[in-house]
Image (cartoon, rainbow, N blue to C red):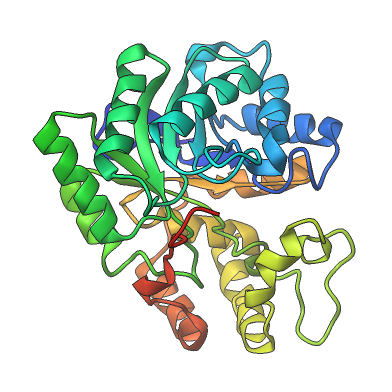
Amino acid sequence: MEFRHLGRSGLMVSELAYGNWITHGSQIEEEAAAACVKAALDEGITTFDTADVYAGTRAEEVLGRALRGQRRESLEIFTKVYWPTGDGRNDRGLSRKHIFESIHGSLRRLGTDYVDLYQAHRFDHETPLEETLRAFDDLVRQGKVLYVGVSEWRAEEIARALKIADEMGLDRIVSNQPQYSMLWRVIESEVVPLSEREGVGQVVFSPLAQGVLTGKYVPGQAPPAGSRATDAEGGASVIKRVLREEVLTRVQRLRPIAEEAGLSMAQLAVAWVLQNPNVSSAIIGASRPEQVRDNARAAGVRLDPALLKRIDEVLEPVIERDPARTVSPPRRP
């Protein structure tokens, strides 16, 4: 495993992070989840990403138990706040009240005194940004949070937060967690250039495009049993937008490129996002330990420019590049 700085901060994170969106507490049993976390640790992964909302807060509990007994200082634990965690009017968003109540719940579920990175899971249009940033800064000063970041924010939203933090002397955002893959490149035109200037690193999720880039979804055939596309509790609704015949056909054309590079399809996809120097870490998820081990082989891989060009030529018609596709709810859910 290789390591990179989280943005321009001094914090080092593993090139691959293990994330438990959808899987822990939902799609797979806890015993299997613990086996995946152990496989991640065995592969040298030290960075773990979760969120209070995943599996209705159960994902944090599962991750906390899976990491029990590990030396806390050797881990980087990330979580998030924004989406509803209860039925109350204030059980959502980025108000000071919800941020403070949410971090205390996350710390309890994770079994830790602090998280290394606390992220605003979406932009909250109903809370003054100054209020959110001051609350984050207070948590940093209290030692409950070491660094702050955001997830799926637009370039102009990140820029506003950085300007306010500088003017008010608050802790600055050091990371953004966007979706990013060969097929989904909406951050490249605006978010990445801003982030490079301002020292914000990307902690990207879905580098496999919800599993489509593994090549296991074949055009004209039903999704494999037990795959994310068959998970009625969450996975199927997320993946359906990329399960189009044109996308699946072009993804299959990546297979000889991966074989030429000596990589599996999944390894090629993960290695591809790591070629972007603004990416601090790529989040991988898994329902089986062997998936973790396969993905981990992408760490440290350097892809030839000619190979990257061939990937672009294969996928260009189905690549999404519009930065407007990054959207936060206009009102709290």
| Direction from residue 107 to residue 217 in the image, left or right | right
- At which x and y percent is residue 152? 42, 55
Residue that appears at 65% across and 46% down: 21
Q: Is residue 295 above or below residue 105?
A: below
**To which quarter of the image does residue 213 belong?**
bottom right
Query: Residue reaching furthest front?
Result: 89
**To which quarter of the image does residue 242 belong?**
bottom right
Residue that appears at 62% across and 41% down: 53
Residue that appears at 36% across and 21% down: 139
Residue that appears at 54% across and 58% down: 207
Query: Is residue 159 visible to the viewer in this orientation of the structure?
Result: yes
Q: Is residue 292 above or below residue 34?
A: below
Asked whether 288 or 168 is in front, the reply is 168
Query: Residue reaching furthest right?
Result: 225
**Which quadrant does the C terminus fall into?**
bottom right
- At which x and y percent is residue 122? 44, 51
Query: Is residue 76 visible to the viewer in this orientation of the structure?
Result: no
